[in-house]
């Protein structure tokens, strides 16, 4: 019968060191992973929101309203705005009068969420240059037909072409699905504006969207609107407006990510410190030998800091690898300002790599600094004494 051979002290010591090092790397990598996924989420939100608008489109809303749902523009005010100089008018006026409302629908998960219903005209569709029908067709103006954004179609139940949705006292037949390069419009449903206003007995529009003849006209048009006492309205670039409308959600994600990162990074830094301290204690004789051979204190300091740096580099790369697995994974939540469903994707780019590696190196070096300083203070006579 073969008996187990007990581990000797040196092997057991080596095993503990290696295990501690592995768990330290995993701890640092976990912090990098959590932080990078939060950054990816926020970057994805920014890209989704900014891409929602066009560079040469101006959106007009009621002054002081943070979202389209809160805005209200009378038809007489809309008529005045549409006559302003600088609006693209060839071959026909590029102006869309739009109404935005929220309805509550059931998701495939069983929960409910608010969805944006946008009433618009054919000009409104033309102003969104990157829209593409992926299945079915566009709705016909003046009809109770509806087209649905890709993100909504994937997450909500009962949304198939040919099926109907009930809201506003009307029955709306689904005739198509559309996509718009992963921007915020994919989280909306579009219908004919005239029919939507009749269904909800609305006498006012939510927004006016128009294309500029030249971007330089934007400031002049905004000034005309601000100075006209008949128009309690304001005009902004479309991209700027949608970016501002999601600032609360972006801030929440940033604050949450920063808080979690600070909490986790403290633990990971302490773990790195314990690992480096164990390395120093197990190498006292080596440190003493180096000192006896004439190596200076700062050289020993940099040697241990370099080891901490290498450890953090491995951790950073592993954490980034884990984060990269979430690339283009779609996430949806409620926009805190518009209270509507918004889908966006994790975005992995060079900025995420840079900030993730920076965090990992900072934690690793910070954790290795105190043990490295301690190594330089070890006396040769004490270090060479038998353990």
Image (tube, rainbow, N blue to C red):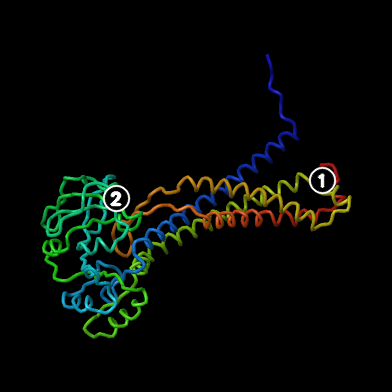
State the residue in front, 75 or 314.
75
Instruction: Using the image, determine if residue 35 lies above or below residue 224.
Output: above
Instruction: Using the image, determine if residue 340 lies above or below residue 5.
Output: below
What percent of the width, then of the height, locates residue 183? 35, 57
Instruction: Using the image, determine if residue 86 lies above or below residue 327.
Output: below
State the residue in front, 91 or 138.
91
Q: Quadrant of residue 72?
A: bottom left
Mark 2 — residue? 150
What percent of the width, then of the height, locates residue 145? 15, 53
Residue at the spot 22% in from the left edge and 75% down from the top edge: 82
User: Is residue 174 shown left or right of residue 37?
Assistant: left
Mark 1 — residue? 286
State the residue in front, 146 or 285.
146
Estimate the spatial distance between the alpha carbons at disc 1 and disc 2, rounded to whole Å: 63 Å
Residue at the spot 51% in from the left edge and 45% down from the top edge: 322
What percent of the width, then of the height, locates residue 211? 29, 70
First along the sequence among labels 1 and 2: 2
Query: What secondary structure is marked by label 1?
Result: helix
User: Is residue 257 shown left or right of residue 167?
Assistant: right
Mark 1 nearby-residue class (10 Å; few <14, some 14–19, many ≥20): some
Query: What secondary structure is marked by label 2?
Result: helix
């Amino acid at each position: 019968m073969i008996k187990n051979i007990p581990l000797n002290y040196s092997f057991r010591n080596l095993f503990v060191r290696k295990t501690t090092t592995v768990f330290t790397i995993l701890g640092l990598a976990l912090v990098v992973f959590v932080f990078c996924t939060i950054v990816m989420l926020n970057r994805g939100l920014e890209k989704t929101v900014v891409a929602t608008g066009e560079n040469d489109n101006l959106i007009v809303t009621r002054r002081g309203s943070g979202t389209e749902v809160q805005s209200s523009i009378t038809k007489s005010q809309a008529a005045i705005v549409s006559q302003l100089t600088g609006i693209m008018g060839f071959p026909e006026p590029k102006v869309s009068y739009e109404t935005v409302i929220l309805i509550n629908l059931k998701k495939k998960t069983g929960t409910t969420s608010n969805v944006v219903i946008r009433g618009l005209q054919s000009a409104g569709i033309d102003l969104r240059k990157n829209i593409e029908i992926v299945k079915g067709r566009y709705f016909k103006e003046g009809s109770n037909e509806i087209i649905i954004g890709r993100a909504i179609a994937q997450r909500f139940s009962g949304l198939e072409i040919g099926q109907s949705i009930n809201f506003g006292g009307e029955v709306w037949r689904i005739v198509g699905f559309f996509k718009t390069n992963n921007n915020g419009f994919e989280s909306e449903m579009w219908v004919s504006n005239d029919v939507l206003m009749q269904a909800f007995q609305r006498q006012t529009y939510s927004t006016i969207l128009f294309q500029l003849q030249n971007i330089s006209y934007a400031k002049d048009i905004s000034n005309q609107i601000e100075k006209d006492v008949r128009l309690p309205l304001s005009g902004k670039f479309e991209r700027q407006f949608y970016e501002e409308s999601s600032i609360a959600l972006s801030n929440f994600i940033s604050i949450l990510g920063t808080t979690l990162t600070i909490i986790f990074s403290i633990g990971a830094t302490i773990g790195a410190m314990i690992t480096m301290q164990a390395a120093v204690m197990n190498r006292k004789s080596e440190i003493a030998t180096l000192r006896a051979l004439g190596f200076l204190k700062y050289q020993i300091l940099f040697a241990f800091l370099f080891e901490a740096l290498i450890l953090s580099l491995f951790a950073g790369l592993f954490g980034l690898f884990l984060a990269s697995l979430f690339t283009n994974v779609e996430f949806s939540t409620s926009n805190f300002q518009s209270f509507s469903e918004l889908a966006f994707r994790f975005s992995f780019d060079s900025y995420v790599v840079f900030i993730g590696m920076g965090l990992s190196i900072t934690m690793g070096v910070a954790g290795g600094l105190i043990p490295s300083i301690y190594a330089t203070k070890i006396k040769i006579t004490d270090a060479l004494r038998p353990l």
